[in-house]
């Protein structure tokens, strides 16, 4: 064994005995890269060892957190997160989106047939869409459907980590993720573009983009690389083109808002069914994430203060409720009854008008 190899052997032994299987993999991935030029046969043997399913051979996927940088410097924050807890809910997806995602899963089931024809299942996807519409949630869901661990790399964090090391940080993460089947989620990929204006970083940024360009195109089809952005216009078109698939997430339309409201109301649905149409109306233009937050708040209030619940929730959903004139209160009560099928008594109490007034207005409107 030459000196170089024995040093490498010692490092592997040290990491293994310290119980750091993630770092062993990281280190080996680095060795593969180095050995490719000097000793391709050795490199490919090492590489195939790295593909051993880690679920069987080590506890790596169960580790709650591992720092991709730990192998190099313990004082730096870890950049890669694992998502351990499965989301209790499936994402709500509109029709075309659902079809696209199902397609990804179906291609995997036909992997061999595809490969026989020289085709590969899609292995790199870019998600675009506003905040809170399910990009992260869907990455998590896909990883569950594929039975693969999910690792999340926030590129904003990578970019704000010490510059000059950014490229090697990213490299380590990508090498690690390629070393075994998994889903790697590159969140906020536009963070790379945002730094482009900073003159001092030009060289480093070019390197970063180049690293990504190569990797996206050659991502192993056993795994899945998903990138996400709220700012598609900032992402380098050369980068964008490399992804096998481009998936667009939108704010929910009225029918999806309704599905979301019903789903998020959960076990409170039966008691609050009369509020559903009104809630849907009040949540137009909101993201799933905001809708969920609003509904959870209402559910908590209902539990804690059931008597004031309806009044409080209306005050919350319509901030200027208390400043309405009498005329406005009457029209609003009528609207609740006619458009949202509210019981007259409830509408009357809520808006401080009499049931008779509502009845009269309703019959006038019908006449
Ligand atoms: N399509 C959806 N179906 C059901 N719930 C959703 C959906 N989208 C978002 N939510 C709710 O909002 C939360 C946040 O969503 P998520 O983190 O996936 O948004 P995102 O699109 O990744 O946003 P960002 O761009 O800010 O990262 C989820 O945990 C879930 O509770
Ligand atoms: Mg997200």
Image: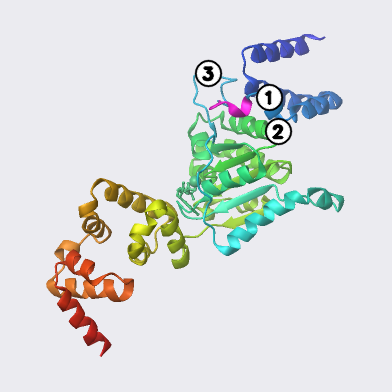
Q: Quadrant of the N terminus?
A: top right
Span colored in magenta: 60-66
The tag earlier along the polypeptide, 2 or 1, is 1
Q: CA distance from mark 3 to mark 2?
A: 24 Å
Residue visible at 25% across and 61% down in the picture: 318
- Label 2, residues with CA under 10 Å away: few <14, some 14-19, many ≥20: many
Q: Residue at x 24, y 58 (%)?
A: 310
Residues at circles 2 and 1 in contact by the CB criterion of under 8 Å: yes
Image coordinates for residue 327, horizontal then vertical, percent = 15, 75
- Which quarter of the picture shows residue 7? top right
Disc 3 is placed on an element classified as loop
**Badge 3 residue CB within 8 Å of ligand 2:** no
Q: Nearer the viewer, mark 3 or mark 1?
A: 1
Tell me if residue 145 comes above or below residue 50 in the rendering: below
Residue pushed farthest front? 270
Horizontal arrangement in the rendering, residue 228 relative to residue 331 (left or right): right
Q: Residues within 10 Å of mark 3 (few under 14, many from 20)?
A: few
Q: On the image, numbered disc 1 is attached to which residue?
A: 25
Q: How is the image coloured?
A: rainbow
Assess disc 1: are there few (<14), some (14-19) or many (≥20) residues with their C-alpha within 10 Å of its C-alpha: many
Apparent side of residue 238 relative to residue 275 in the rendered image (left or right): right
- What residue sits right under mark 2 in the picture? 180
Provide the secondary structure element on which disc 2 rests: loop
**Residue 99 visible from this viewpoint:** yes
Closest to the observer, 78 or 102: 102
Tell us which disc is closer to us: 3 or 2: 2
Q: Which residue is mark 3?
A: 74
């Amino acid at each position: 064994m030459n000196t170089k190899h024995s040093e490498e052997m010692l490092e592997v032994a040290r990491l293994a005995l310290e119980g750091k299987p993630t770092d062993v993999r990281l280190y080996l991935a680095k060795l593969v890269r180095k050995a490719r030029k000097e000793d391709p046969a050795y490199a490919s043997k090492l590489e195939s060892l790295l593909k051993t399913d880690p679920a069987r051979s080590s506890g790596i996927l169960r580790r709650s957190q591992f720092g991709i940088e730990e192998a190099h410097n313990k004082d730096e924050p870890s950049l890669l997160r694992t998502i351990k807890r499965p989301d209790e809910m499936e994402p709500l997806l509109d029709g075309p989106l659902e079809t696209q995602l199902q397609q990804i899963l179906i291609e995997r089931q036909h992997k061999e047939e595809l490969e026989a024809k020289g085709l590969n299942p899609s292995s790199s996807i870019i998600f675009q869409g506003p905040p809170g519409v399910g990009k992260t949630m869907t990455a998590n869901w896909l990883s569950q459907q594929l039975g693969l661990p999910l690792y999340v790399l926030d590129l904003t964090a990578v970019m704000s980590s010490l510059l000059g090391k950014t490229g090697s940080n990213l490299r380590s993460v990508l090498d690690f993720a390629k070393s075994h089947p998994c889903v790697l989620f590159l969140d906020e990929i536009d963070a790379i573009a945002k730094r482009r204006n900073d003159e001092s970083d030009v060289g480093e940024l070019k390197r970063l983009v180049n690293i990504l360009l190569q990797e996206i195109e050659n991502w192993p089809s056993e795994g899945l690389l998903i990138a996400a952005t709220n700012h598609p216009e900032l992402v380098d078109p050369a980068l964008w083109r490399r992804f096998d698939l481009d998936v667009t997430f939108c704010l929910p339309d009225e029918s999806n808002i309704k599905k979301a409201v019903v789903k998020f109301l959960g076990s409170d649905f039966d008691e609050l069914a009369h509020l559903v149409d009104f809630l849907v109306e009040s949540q137009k233009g909101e993201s799933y994430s905001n809708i969920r937050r609003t509904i959870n708040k209402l559910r908590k209030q209902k539990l804690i203060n059931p008597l004031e619940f309806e009044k409080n929730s209306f005050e919350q959903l319509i901030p200027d409720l208390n400043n309405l004139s009498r005329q406005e209160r009457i029209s609003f009560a009528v609207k609740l009854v006619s458009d949202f099928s509210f019981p007259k008594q409830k509408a009357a109490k809520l808006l401080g008008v009499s049931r008779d007034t509502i009845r009269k207005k309703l019959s006038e409107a019908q006449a």
